[in-house]
Amino acid sequence: MDPNQQQQQLHVVFLPFLAQGHMIPITDMARLFARHGVKSTIITTPLNAPLFSGKIDRDAQLGLQIRTHVVEFPAAEAGLPEGCENLSRANESFEMVVTFYKSMELLRRPVEELLQQWRPDCLVADFPFHWASESARKLDIPRLYFNATGSFAMCLCECLNRHQPHKRVESDSEPFLLPGLPHEIRVTRGRIPGEFRPEVNDDDPSVKELRDLMLESEVTSYGVVVNSFYELEPGYPEHYKHEMGRKAWFIGPLSLSNKDDMKHKAERGDSAAAIDRHESCLRWLDSKEPNSVIYICFGSIPIPFNADQLREIAAALETLLSRQISFIWVVKKEEWLPEGFEERITEGGKGLVIRGWAPQVLILDHGAIGGFVTHCGWNSTLEGVCAGVPMVTWPLQAEQFLNEKLVTDVLKIGVGVGAEEWSIQERKIIVGREEIQSAITRVMVGEEAEEMRSRARKLKEIAVMANEEGGSSYFDMELLVQELTDLRDKRNNDGCSKS
Ligand SMILES: O=c1ccn([C@@H]2O[C@H](COP(=O)(O)OP(=O)(O)O[C@H]3O[C@H](CO)[C@@H](O)[C@H](O)[C@H]3O)[C@@H](O)[C@H]2O)c(=O)[nH]1
């Protein structure tokens, strides 16, 4: 690139929260920006960089202007154990999670120093970096806010915040209407995100203060980039922009930016772990009939399911094997399974248990996968949509029950397993084997399954089209790059006329 061109090139800095559910989409976003001619820099910490730097380095070798920059993470100063640099390592207790969120404040100084030095044209920062809008303002550049979830959940949360309907019900199981939304959506207090639940907020005022700071930074940011596409959340992007008054660009699903590149797909989220096992996993899938395998995974943050609950899942899966429904089940490395279970199901390649990190996107995209049991994390939800598979929804916490509503009630591409309330702290059986079996059977076989699969496949096609030239996400991305360029030019002109 000649020096003149280099000077003209827009430089965007990305600051992802230190959790896979955030680093994965932001890495894809930075790569998308680079493909639209932008110079992208991702700031992260030493132990997180290797989780995605392989694909960034490969992109850079192909000539894209993209790089990772590492800053030290002061875990000890934050009151965290040494090496605790990722949310997945900090979920031993609620207090530790809160400490981890608060520790993002400690990245402020090093990040601001880098911004001063680099003087980029825009900062895209995740929601826990509530100070980022102020940091960007000091340089007179826009801060774009990223929340990592969709507009459906963001609109529902804003509705809870504005109208507080959850405060007018008698119990956690009494349904109430969320007013003023494009659809008639009813939820219960047991299913809403933690920040609206009194038992989470009342004990520690600093939690509420932190949440308010994050909310405020969404409003005071220049605008919001959303990992979604207009057609997926009918009416909600418009509601988010016009009723809630946010400037927003819908540029997803970002997972599609990996297109058909097997290596990128296999490496998503944990280069080393997934690359080791993706080939054997694909070989196993190749031996199965189309739509005959259910994939079960509860996201990147280890879920403390108790032994009884694991036993219920295992029993359901073993019974389903006799009905020609096979499975891939992702469990934590140390998770305890019923005696002899792994030996029995591994024999003859009946089922597959993956301990640790699975190459999820690669698995979902395989023709043998007929359904997905998901906790409804937004990335997994989008990846299910992009693979065109119906889902069994098993939300556990955060905004996952809201995402479930979109999948089951609005898009009608999934069925709920019957999880009724937050269950992350309570180590009890949430869902029994019969319910699990029944929900999986509903999405895998029969007329209802075919109808859901057909809707899911249409949605997949629309998702792909949204990302192609002329599609809605492509269009929004072009608009965003143009707006950032105009802002940069205006800044430069104002600077010239002042001097
Ligand atoms: O073995 C695994 C496990 C996960 N993943 C990937 O990890 C990501 C997980 O993201 P998500 O499905 O969103 O789940 P969480 O990691 O639980 O995400 C947190 O962050 C999301 C975005 O804000 C929220 O929607 C969730 O509620 C919150 O739990 C996805 O891209 C998966 O493909 C893998 O590739 N292999």
Image: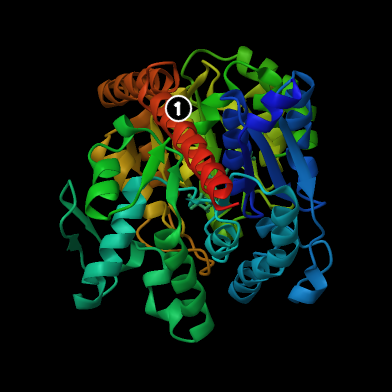
Task: Name the side, left or right, on which 490 lies relative to 116.
Answer: left
Task: Name the side, left or right, on which 165 lies relative to 450.
Answer: left
Residue 6 or 445: which is nearer the viewer? 6
Q: Is residue 362 visible?
A: yes
Task: Name the side, left or right, on which 72 lies relative to 37.
Answer: right
Task: Name the side, left or right, on which 172 lies relative to 102.
Answer: left
At x 24%, y 77%, the residue is 167
- 339 in relation to 320, above or below: below
- Mark 1 neighbour density, 10 Å: few (under 14) some (14–19) many (20 or more): some
Please provide percent x and percent y for residue 445.
36, 23
Question: Tag 1: residue type?
Answer: Glu
Please provide percent x and percent y for residue 328.
59, 32
Q: Quadrant of residue 297?
A: top right
Identify the residue under disc 1: 478
- 96 in relation to 49, above or below: below
At x 63%, y 30%, the residue is 8
Please provide percent x and percent y for residue 389.
42, 26
Under circle 1, the secondary element is helix
At x 71%, y 56%, the residue is 116
- 120 in relation to 99, above or below: above
Residue 419 or 343: which is nearer the viewer? 419
Please provide percent x and percent y for residue 1.
74, 20
Residue 208 or 14: which is nearer the viewer? 14
